[in-house]
Image: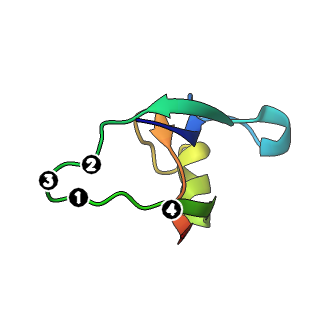
């Protein structure tokens, strides 16, 4: 199953993020939902301050990271 996602490929990156462009929108392959899971169509997604702290490496996470913690489902 394919979907489009905001992907963080490396961290840390320098601000301003409008110049360093740490996130890339790309098509990714996902496993289909399992027996105890549901598929939800996301209409919009955004970033919060906690997400930005991962980009600047205040809260390091392994990269390749998919984003969208603030969601609006359809």
Residue that badge 1 annotates: 37
Callout 2 secondary element: loop
Which of the numbered marks, if any, corresponds to residue 35? 3
For the N terminus, the image quarter is: top left
Q: Is residue 2 left or right of residue 33?
A: right
- Label 4: few (<14), some or many (≥20) within 10 Å? few
- Residue at 49%, 60% (x, y): give it: 41
Front position among marks 1 and 4: 1
Q: Nearer the viewer, residue 30 or 10?
A: 30
Residue that badge 4 annotates: 69
- Label 3: few (<14), some or many (≥20) within 10 Å? few
Residue 40 seen in the current view: yes
Front position among marks 2 and 4: 2
Gap between marks 2 and 4 measured at Cα: 19 Å
Gap between marks 4 and 3 measured at Cα: 23 Å
Gap between marks 2 and 3 measured at Cα: 7 Å
Q: Is residue 18 left or right of residue 6?
A: right
- Label 1: few (<14), some or many (≥20) within 10 Å? few
- Residue at 29%, 60% (x, y): give it: 38
Farthest-out residue, left: 35
Check contact, mark 1 vs mark 3: CB within 8 A.
yes
- The disc, 1 or 4, on the residue closer to the chain's N-terminal end is 1
Callout 3 secondary element: loop
Residue 16 seen in the current view: no
């Amino acid at each position: 199953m394919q979907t489009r996602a905001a992907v963080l490929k490396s961290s840390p990156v320098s601000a301003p993020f409008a110049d360093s462009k740490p996130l890339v929108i790309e098509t990714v392959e996902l496993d289909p939902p399992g027996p105890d899971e549901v598929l939800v169509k996301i209409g919009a997604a955004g970033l919060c301050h906690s997400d930005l702290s991962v980009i600047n490496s205040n809260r390091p996470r392994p990269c390749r990271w998919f984003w969208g913690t603030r969601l609006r489902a359809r």
